[in-house]
């Protein structure tokens, strides 16, 4: 029987070229854990790995075992530790070259990823898409039949914008880009289950953001334009578990910044 999400410690084939190895780091922000993607062109023994995952020797070892040591290239979707913590252990185990947009995560390469670059490795053509918003360094990777979305679009729920450099202005334009790029392609997220179609999920994400923006606008109407952002959270996220309020607070901050620009 075919494996279904979540399948900890097992390489689960999702598309013809993409298989996923789920790290055992479940949590509020990571859902069931971090998805490490293994991309392999038909008939090839080498592969491309996307997101080595957290610091977890068992996970790094499981990746190395799953790929038989032959990684042509490892790519990183963004800087967060649950995606990048395992870089050095994986490089140690397999000698893989690592590329990312943020130069801090380059290993064996001095070329940060750039927008629209086509990476050719292990018989695959992978198009890099700049998709800032969750973080400034977030990128997605487009294959012929799928898009790896990192934390820009998750397999369930919605994503949180990093208060330090994520912006809703960036995020909305990235989501619009993914509606376009996602037509007829599968969604391979860094957390949560994969989906056969990216486009409707990207559209849902945009609708959800507009809904929240409308709620924040309505809250400001009542509280006044200079309302404290935590008061806005109390009004708008009244239906959300209080443990998620710190995350909601950073989202509200991002929305207030957005409304200052776009009204
Ligand atoms: Zn992240």
Image (spheres, rainbow, N blue to C red):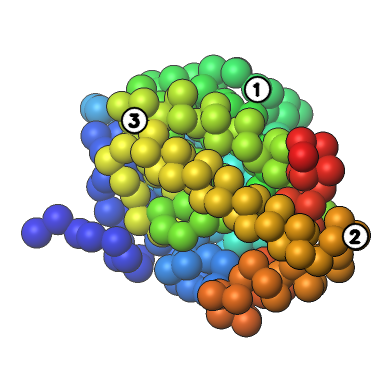
- The x, y position of residue 263, in whole percent, is 77, 40
- The x, y position of residue 218, in whole percent, is 68, 57
Q: CA distance from mark 2 to mark 1?
A: 37 Å
- The circle on residue 97 is none
- Give the quarter of the figure containing the N terminus: bottom left
**Could you tell which of marks 1 and 3 lies nearer the N-terminus?**
1
Depth order, front residue of 177/83: 177
- The circle on residue 185 is 3
Residue at point 32% right, 65% down?
6
Residue at point 46% right, 60% down?
157
Q: Residue furthest left?
A: 1
Judged from the image, the secondary structure of the residue bearing numbered disc 2 is loop
Which residue lies under the disc numbered 1? Answer: 115
**Could you tell which of marks 2 and 1 lies nearer the N-terminus?**
1
**Could you tell which of marks 2 and 3 lies nearer the N-terminus?**
3
Mark 1 vs mark 3, foreground winner is: 3
Q: Are marks 2 and 3 in contact (CB under 8 Å)?
A: no
Mark 2 vs mark 3, foreground winner is: 2
- Res 47 quadrant in image: top left
Image height of 189 relative to 117, above or below: below
Q: CA distance from mark 1 to mark 3?
A: 19 Å
Residue at point 52% right, 56% down?
158
**In this image, 58 relative to 260: left or right?**
left
Which residue lies under the disc numbered 2? Answer: 226
Depth order, front residue of 31/118: 31
């Amino acid at each position: 029987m075919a494996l279904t999400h979540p399948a900890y410690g097992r390489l689960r084939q999702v598309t013809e070229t993409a298989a996923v190895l789920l790290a055992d780091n479940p949590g509020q922000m990571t859902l069931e854990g971090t998805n490490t993607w293994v991309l392999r062109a038909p008939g090839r023994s080498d592969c491309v790995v996307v997101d080595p995952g957290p610091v977890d020797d068992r996970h790094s070892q499981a990746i190395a075992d799953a790929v038989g040591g032959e990684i042509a290239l490892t790519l990183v979707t963004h800087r967060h530790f649950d995606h990048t913590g395992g870089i050095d252990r994986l490089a140690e185990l397999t000698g893989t070259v690592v590329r990312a947009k943020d130069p801090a995560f380059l290993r064996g390469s001095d070329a940060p990823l750039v927008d629209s670059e086509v990476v050719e490795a292990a018989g695959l053509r992978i198009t890099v898409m700049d998709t800032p918003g969750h973080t400034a360094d977030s990128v997605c990777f487009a294959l012929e039949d799928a898009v790896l979305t990192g934390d820009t679009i998750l397999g369930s729920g919605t994503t949180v914008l990093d208060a330090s450099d994520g912006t809703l202005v960036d995020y909305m334009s990235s989501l619009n880009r993914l509606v376009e790029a996602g037509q007829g392609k599968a969604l391979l997220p860094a957390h949560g289950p994969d989906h056969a179609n990216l486009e409707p999920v990207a559209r849902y994400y945009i609708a959800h953001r507009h809904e929240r923006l409308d709620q924040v606008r309505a809250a400001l109407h009542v509280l006044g334009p200079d309302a404290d952002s935590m008061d806005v959270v109390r009004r708008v996220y009244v239906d959300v578990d209080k443990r998620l309020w710190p995350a909601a607070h950073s989202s509200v901050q991002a929305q207030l910044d957005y409304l200052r620009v776009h009204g």
